[in-house]
Each structure stands twice: as structure tokens, then as C-alpha cells.
């Protein structure tokens, strides 16, 4: 089983719908991240969390919200999805101590907004 | 100006050749630099990290860092078709409350058999 699990892996929805992407991890890491990836734009940071009480906006947080339900769970919500939120979304984790620069990514959630 | 810039490619090299991937960054005091590999449809994985000027070798991979010129590169020797992937340069910025990795847009590499 993957250490960082994202659900759903694929989702097609319509404009205006509320969508939640979920991430859970078994690595025991404190820090969790949500990125989106678009062709030609690389990975852009949406939100990140250092622990359940510490949530921070990233580069492109508008239109998104997050919830850190527990150390192991970090969810990303699109309150009212729009077509330009069509992208590949990655959750990632890393330890708070002994950081080497390595982020551990989930397998990705492909979201299509029609 | 983007904080981390890479040639988007695609870059094609024949099998056995050296593939050279380049990255420049804008934050002059950045301290740590990373190369991630991402196969099509998969998640990124860390393959190299470098913190000091000069070269760092790991098997067929060599990372090169020049802080004065603000560039970092990745050389892949004896390229194999299995090296075909997108390579993402990532930089740990030194300033700002975020201090999170900033990724370039990636260079797509194809190694031709």
C-alpha cells in the first residue's frame, strides 16, 4: 500500500459543484502539502500544514480551502469548482525534523471540471 | 520573472548519450537544490540534491551547482530509454515565511533507442 494515499484518483464534475480531495499518510510526517500541476507550469503550492493547528496559504490558494483533520489526514476542497481548476492534484508530506528536501508524493488526483 | 526556470523541451537524446538539463533561479541566497524525476502519469520522486558549489555524482547522475551564476544542472550519462521522463528542478528559498520548495516547470526528456 502507498504511504501517501489520495482519493479519488480521478474525478469529473461540473462547474459550481463542491469537490473534496482527500489525502492520508502512514509516514508519520508532520507536514503536509497540496500542489496542483498543469502542463507547462510545473507544481504550484496551494496550501500547506505544519500540524493540525497550523495551516498556511501557498502560491495559488484562491478558490480552495483545506482541512487538517488529524496528523495523517489533509483534505482539499473546491467550494464551487470552475473549469480552470481542471488539473492534476498532488498531496505530499515531509518530516518536520531531519528534512533533506525530499517530499513524498501521493499518486495524484486528476480533476476535470466541465 | 519566475523564481525557478527550466527549458521546457522536449529534449531528445540517443541512447548512450549525455543528457544535460539546466535550471536557473532568481533568489540569490537559496541554499538547497533538488532534482525530481516524474514519469508520465506518476508522481515526482527525488533523485538528486545538492547544497554546495561544484559537482555531486550519484551513479549515472551528476548535479552541478554554480551559486554565483544562479544555475543548477543535471547530467545523465549513458542515457537509457528508462530515463525518459520529466525532470523538475526545485529550490528551497531562503526568504519569506513559507520557506517551501519552489518547482520549475520541468524539462521533458526522451531517450531514443
Image (tube, coloured by chain):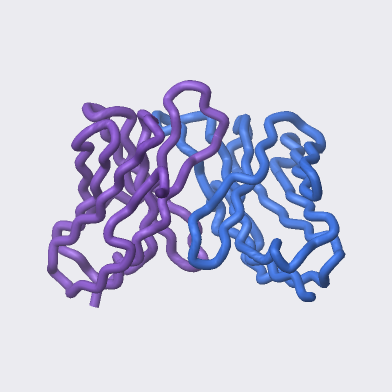
Residue A37 x %, y %? 43, 60
Quadrant where the C terminus of chain A lies? bottom left
Q: Colour of chain A?
A: purple
Q: Considering depth in this image, is B26 or A68 the residue closer to the camera?
A: A68
Q: Quadrant of residue B66?
A: top right
Q: Quadrant of residue B27?
A: top right
The answer to whether B105 appears left or right of A56 in the picture is: right
Chain depicted in blue: B
The answer to whether B18 appears left or right of B29 in the picture is: right
Q: Considering depth in this image, is A8 or B2 the residue closer to the camera?
A: A8
Residue A82 x %, y %? 22, 68
Q: Residue at x 54, y 47 (%)?
A: B3
Residue at the extreme bottom: A114
The answer to whether A2 appears left or right of B69 in the picture is: left
Residue A79 x %, y %? 15, 57
> Do we see residue A59 in this rendering?
no
Residue A54 x %, y %? 26, 28
Residue at the extreme top: A97
The answer to whether A62 appears left or right of B30 in the picture is: left
Q: Residue at x 79, y 60 (%)?
A: B19
Residue B85 lies, with reference to residue A22, above or below; the image says below
Amino acid at each position: 500500500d502507498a504511504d501517501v494515499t489520495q482519493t479519488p484518483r480521478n474525478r469529473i464534475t461540473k462547474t459550481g459543484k463542491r469537490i473534496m480531495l482527500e489525502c492520508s499518510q502512514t509516514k508519520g510526517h508532520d507536514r503536509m502539502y497540496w500542489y496542483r500541476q498543469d502542463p507547462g507550469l510545473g507544481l504550484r503550492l496551494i496550501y500547506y500544514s505544519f500540524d493540525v493547528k497550523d495551516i498556511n496559504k501557498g502560491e495559488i490558494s484562491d478558490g480552495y480551502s483545506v482541512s487538517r483533520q488529524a496528523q495523517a489526514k489533509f483534505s482539499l476542497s473546491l467550494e464551487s469548482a470552475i473549469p480552470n481548476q481542471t488539473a492534476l492534484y498532488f498531496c505530499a508530506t515531509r518530516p518536520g525534523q531531519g528534512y533533506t528536501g525530499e517530499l513524498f508524493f501521493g499518486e495524484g488526483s486528476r480533476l476535470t471540471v466541465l | 520573472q519566475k523564481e525557478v526556470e527550466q527549458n521546457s523541451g522536449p529534449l531528445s537524446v540517443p541512447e548512450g548519450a549525455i543528457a544535460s538539463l539546466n535550471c536557473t533561479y532568481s533568489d540569490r541566497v537559496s541554499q538547497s537544490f533538488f532534482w525530481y524525476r516524474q514519469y508520465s502519469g506518476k508522481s515526482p520522486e527525488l533523485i538528486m540534491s545538492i547544497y554546495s558549489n561544484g559537482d555531486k555524482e550519484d551513479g549515472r547522475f551528476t548535479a552541478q551547482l554554480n551559486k554565483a551564476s544562479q544555475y543548477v544542472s543535471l547530467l545523465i550519462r549513458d542515457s537509457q530509454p528508462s530515463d525518459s521522463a520529466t525532470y523538475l528542478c526545485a529550490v528551497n528559498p531562503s526568504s519569506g515565511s513559507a520557506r517551501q520548495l519552489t518547482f520549475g516547470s520541468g524539462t521533458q526528456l526522451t531517450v531514443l533507442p
